[in-house]
Image (cartoon, rainbow, N blue to C red):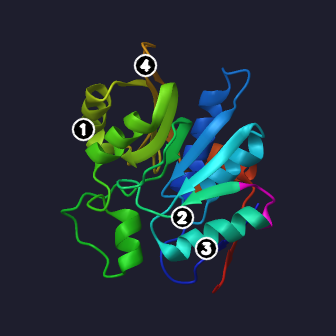
Amino acid sequence: MILYQPIKGYCYNSDTHFLYNFICDSLKKYKNVNGKLLDIGSGSGILGLLLARDYKKLSLNQCEIQDIFQTYSSINSKCNNIDSFIYKDSFIHCDFKKQFDMCVSNPPFYHSCVIKSENKSLKIARYNDSLPLETFIKQNAKILKNNGKLFFCYDVKQLNDIIYFLQKYKLNLESLQFVHPNKNKNASLVLIYARKNSKSLLSILEPLFVFEGKEFSKNTQEIYKKSSTYSIKAHI
């Protein structure tokens, strides 16, 4: 999959690849994956496009507030022959006028109190004051169909808040996976799967270790191979 990205500003990173793999693993138990998919804060479009590539019965929708990434998402959809509808608005204020079977997102999750980049595009993409966690979860609960699926990744240090807000808005935490830089370091990222009005018990997957020594772990290499993306930085 060829993906154009800006030369300067936010570019997708490994978090999105890990989330994509987590989603695919979580969907293995479903025989027929279909319906309306919404990629929230789609950026260059990578996450939704990968899922639409692998699950042909999903109808891809993207929501992106930044003009430049709306353009990149559109270009990348066309380059990879995948149909997509783009909501050109903030996720908070967008009137979708329909509900979705699945929502996915690599949202801005760095806490608002940390030191921020001066780059406006990076601020929107990285820091959660542009999309607070509770607002993100509340809006998903509103637009998901009954039993609809929500997948996202987040800063592991905020897991307590994630669980609280999921319960508050009746999104049942079905599975999670911790991502560690290596076996000797604490988890830095958590991958989340929740379902609306579900009563399933929680499943905790084996942790993902990104590195073994100075090299990518075998699991990380397999994820990159499965994603099979090729990034091109270019002005548009």
Q: Nearer the viewer, residue 103 or 185?
A: 103
Per the image, the residue denoted by label 1 is: 161
Q: CA distance from mark 2 to mark 3?
A: 9 Å
Residue 173: quarter of image? top left
What's the residue type where badge 3 is placed? Answer: Thr
What's the residue type where badge 1 is placed? Answer: Asp
Dot label at residue 43: 2
Front position among marks 4 and 2 = 2
Dot label at residue 71: 3
Front position among marks 2 and 3 = 3
Q: Earlier in the sequence, mark 1 or mark 3?
A: 3
Q: Is residue 183 left or right of residue 7?
A: left
Q: Earlier in the sequence, mark 4 or mark 2?
A: 2
Per the image, the residue denoted by label 4 is: 202
Q: Earlier in the sequence, mark 3 or mark 4?
A: 3
Region rendered in magenta: 79-83
Give coordinates of residue 91: x percent, y percent: 41, 54
Residue with the most extreme bottom position:
235
What's the residue type where badge 4 is placed? Answer: Leu
Main SS, magenta residues: loop
Instruction: From this view, report whether residue 166 is shown above or below residue 16.
Output: above
Q: Quadrant of the C terminus?
A: bottom right
Front position among marks 1 and 2 = 2
Residue 170: quarter of image? top left
What's the residue type where badge 2 is placed? Answer: Gly
Q: CA distance from mark 1 to mark 3?
A: 34 Å
Residue with the most extreme left position:
113
Q: Is residue 209 in the magenta section?
A: no
Q: Is residue 227 left or right of residue 36?
A: right
Disc 4 on helix, strand or loop?
loop
